[in-house]
Image (cartoon, grey):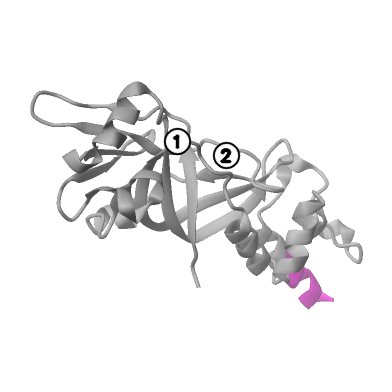
C-alpha cells in the first residue's frame, strides 16, 4: 500500500499580488536536487515524477497552510490553485481568500518562507552515486497537496526505508536498525558472495540490478 510522504523546498514563497488579486506561490519541488540526509540516504525527484498528476488535470490537489485542513487556501478543482511543471520543478500559485488574510500577511512580511508538498510514490529506486552516497530517485507518483510552511518539519524517512526494504526483500525493522546505525551499506555487501557487490563506487549498480545479478549467479551454481 502506498503511503503519503511530505518534502519541502527552501525556495522563498513569493507574493504575487496585484490590484485585482492576491496570490502567493513558488516552487513546491525541484528536480534533480539532492535532499538533506533522510536517515542513511538522500533523495531526488525525476522530472517525470508529476507527469501522471499533470496529465490527469491535477485532480483533488489542494493548497493548505501548514498542511492544515483548517487553513485551506485554494483547490485545483475550483481553479483557485494553479500548478505547472517546468525544467526547474513543480511551481504553484494560489489565490489567498480574504478569510486567510493572516497567511497572506505572514508571506508578505517574510515570516513564511518555505513550501512543502505531499505525494505518494509509485516507482522509485535506490543507487549509489560516484561519492558512494545512497540516493533514492522518485520516478512516478501522485501529488496531493502543496503548502506554504513556517518551519519545515524534518522529513520522515519511514516510507523511503519501507521502499528500500521491499526492494531488498528485507524486514523493515532490520533496514530501520541499519539506517539508525548508519550501516545501510551492509545491504549491498554479502559476506557469502562478496564478489557480487561492486567495489568501485563509480560502477555501483542499483538495488534492482544487484538483486538480478545475484539471482542469475545463484541459478548458474
Query: Within 10 angstroms of label 1, few (less than 14), some, or many (20 or more) residues?
Result: some
> Which mark is on residue 57?
none
Seen as rendered, the residue at the extreme right is: 192
Whether residue 132 can be seen here? yes
Residue at the spot x=43%, y=43% of the render?
116
Depth check: 221 or 176 in front?
Answer: 176
Please tell me whether residue 192 belongs to the stretch shown in magenta: no
Residue at the spot x=47%, y=53% of the render?
139
Please tell me whether residue 216 belongs to the stretch shown in magenta: yes
From the top left corner, tell me how far across and down residue 205 is, in percent.
69, 52
In the picture of the structure, the residue carrying the numbered disc 2 is 35
Seen as rendered, the residue at the extreme left is: 20
From the top left corner, tell me how far across and down residue 79 is, in percent.
15, 48
> Over which residues does the magenta segment extend?
213-221
**105 lies above or below 139:** above
Give the secondary structure at mark 1.
loop
Q: How far apart are marks 1 and 2 (CA)?
A: 18 Å
From the top left corner, tell me how far across and down residue 191 is, in percent.
91, 62
Give the secondary structure at mark 2.
loop
In the picture of the structure, the residue carrying the numbered disc 1 is 150
- Where residue 80 sits, quadrant-wise, is top left
Whether residue 49 can be seen here? no
- Where residue 101 sits, quadrant-wise, is top left
Amino acid at each position: 500500500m502506498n503511503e503519503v510522504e511530505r518534502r519541502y523546498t527552501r525556495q522563498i514563497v513569493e507574493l504575487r499580488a496585484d490590484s485585482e488579486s492576491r496570490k502567493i506561490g513558488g516552487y513546491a519541488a525541484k528536480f534533480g536536487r539532492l535532499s538533506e540526509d533522510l536517515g542513511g540516504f538522500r533523495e531526488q525527484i525525476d522530472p517525470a515524477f508529476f507527469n501522471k498528476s499533470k496529465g490527469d488535470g491535477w485532480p483533488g490537489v489542494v493548497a493548505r497552510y501548514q498542511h492544515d485542513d483548517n487553513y485551506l487556501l485554494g483547490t485545483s478543482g475550483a481553479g483557485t490553485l494553479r500548478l505547472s511543471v517546468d525544467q526547474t520543478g513543480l511551481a504553484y500559485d494560489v489565490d489567498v481568500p480574504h478569510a486567510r488574510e493572516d497567511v497572506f500577511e505572514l508571506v508578505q512580511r517574510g515570516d513564511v518562507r518555505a513550501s512543502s508538498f505531499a505525494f505518494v510514490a509509485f516507482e522509485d529506486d535506490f543507487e549509489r552515486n560516484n561519492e558512494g552516497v545512497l540516493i533514492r530517485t522518485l520516478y512516478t507518483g501522485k501529488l496531493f497537496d502543496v503548502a506554504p510552511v513556517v518551519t519545515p518539519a524534518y522529513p520522515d524517512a519511514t516510507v523511503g526505508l519501507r521502499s528500500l526494504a521491499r526492494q531488498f526483500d528485507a524486514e523493515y525493522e532490520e533496514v530501520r536498525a541499519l539506517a539508525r546505525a548508519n550501516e545501510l551499506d551492509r545491504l549491498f555487501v554479502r559476506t557469502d558472495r562478496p564478489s557480487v557487490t561492486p567495489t568501485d563506487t563509480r560502477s555501483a549498480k542499483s538495488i534492482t540490478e544487484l538483486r538480478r545479478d545475484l539471482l542469475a549467479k545463484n541459478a548458474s551454481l
